[in-house]
Amino acid sequence: MKVVIVGAGEVGFHVASRLSHENKDVVVIDKDSDAIRRISDNIDVQVILGSGSSPVSLEDAGIKEAEILLAVTNSDETNLVACLVANIISPYTKKLARIRNADFDKYHAIFRDHAPHIDTLINPEIEVVKTIDRLMNMPGAVDVGKFANGRVKFIGINLDKEARLAGSRLDEIPALLGKQGPLIAAVIRDEELIIPSGDDRLMPGDLVYFISEEDKILDTLRIFDKYAEPVKRVLIVGGGRIGSRLAVLLDDKPVYTKIIEKNPDICAKLAEKLNKVVVLHGDGSDQGLLNEENVQETDFVITLTNDEEINILASLLAKRMGARKTITKISKFSYFSLMSMIGIEQVVSPRLSAINTILQHIRRGKVLSSISIKGEQAEFMEAVALETSEIVGKPLKNISFPKGALVTSIIRNDNIIIPSGDSIIEPDDKIIIFATRQAIPKIEKILTVKLEYF
């Protein structure tokens, strides 16, 4: 598979890195010489210094032989023009573009059906707001993802030292609970990803990922001593595109919400379009202002400015002053591993959301969705098993999956099956697979060769 990436920023860099490790033919175009140098020094891909919206650059990159064009620069207009030019030169190349400006929201379908015929428009900010909403409504969760139209979710929780399962082996859990426990897909311990077996123990401080049906999530969370707490008061720091979208969402909910923004012009625009949300002009990292707004009585402080250092400081300050929980927007991938060390548990990233959406549409085989966890160490993938599949009709324990891969759910019609070794996949089942980064190429090969008929 050949992929042309327009834009060598954080998203372009990390997608190029992932695809390079999976032995795909990748070409990256950018007019920033420093960004191109970073790519060429760190990743084994072809680079072109030039404009991704230039027909010359696109032809030099081999757009006519490319299966996919990714337009992921920081400019919506550049991404649109790159897709338009690519559509003229190579109309059969699949096009994905990152478009963040809300002014384009109602035109997404038009851009798909008419020139530039963009197959997938990615707005990571919309996905970030959805993630924040899920985190606010999922007690104790630090990571949440959904599959099968929301009927199956994976949840990541930090295991407290007082939790009844702390110190327990996985094969002891059914006896402790008096029933079958949840399927635990992964454990992150000291930043190391572990695919646990029955004799592995859950330790205090572990980040535990488990699978649950939607209607059983609260019961499953109680197993980990996480209980629902009503969200009554929310404080948003930052009234930019994401903060504004979140405020609009909360404006229609029975939640007392305030939003703090430094820019008076943005405050005026927010005040015009919001009905119940209180708009405050000020600095969300100002201890005096937070004290005036009774931050200690706030259920969630959500920091969404365009400066991630301010987001981190404001979240730490709010937590120290007594806010029950914080959600922090982070863009730099190098910061992810530091967050839990300094006491920040719930983190959202527009860039990681963009990468998840991109990978979903790049993966070979009948992949419906793909979500990375813990800084891209692993993925959950949802795929369809077709009649021609070699894995149809025999127990999972007899199927040779690569090390680091696990079938976590089978969705058959209206039934959701948390599988055992004796479970059998049938034609047209949807399956959810968890795979480490190292196992993904082999899983992709299975999805292409075994799950999909050519």
Image (cartoon, rainbow, N blue to C red):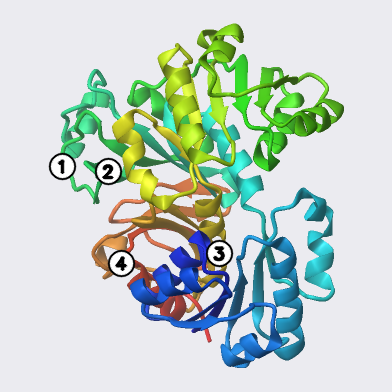
Number of the front mark, 1 or 3:
3
Q: Which mark is residue 439?
A: 4
Q: Mark 2 Cα within 10 Å, few/some/many (few <14, many 20+)? A: many
Distance between the alpha carbons at the discs numbered 4 and 2 = 17 Å
Give SS at disc 3.
Answer: helix
Number of the front mark, 2 or 3:
3
Number of the front mark, 1 or 4:
4
Give SS at disc 4.
Answer: loop
Q: Which of 89/408 is in front?
A: 89
- Residue on which disc 3 sits: 358
**Amino acid carrying mark 1 in the image:** Asp
56 vs 427: above or below: below
The reply to whether dot 2 and dot 1 touch (C-beta < 8 Å) is yes
Q: Mark 3 Cα within 10 Å, few/some/many (few <14, many 20+)? A: many
- Residue on which disc 1 sits: 200
The reply to whether dot 4 and dot 2 touch (C-beta < 8 Å) is no
Query: Which label's residue is closer to the chain start, 1 or 3?
Result: 1
Query: Which label's residue is closer to the chain start, 4 or 3?
Result: 3
- Residue on which disc 2 sits: 187
**Amino acid carrying mark 2 in the image:** Val
Distance between the alpha carbons at the discs numbered 2 and 1 = 10 Å
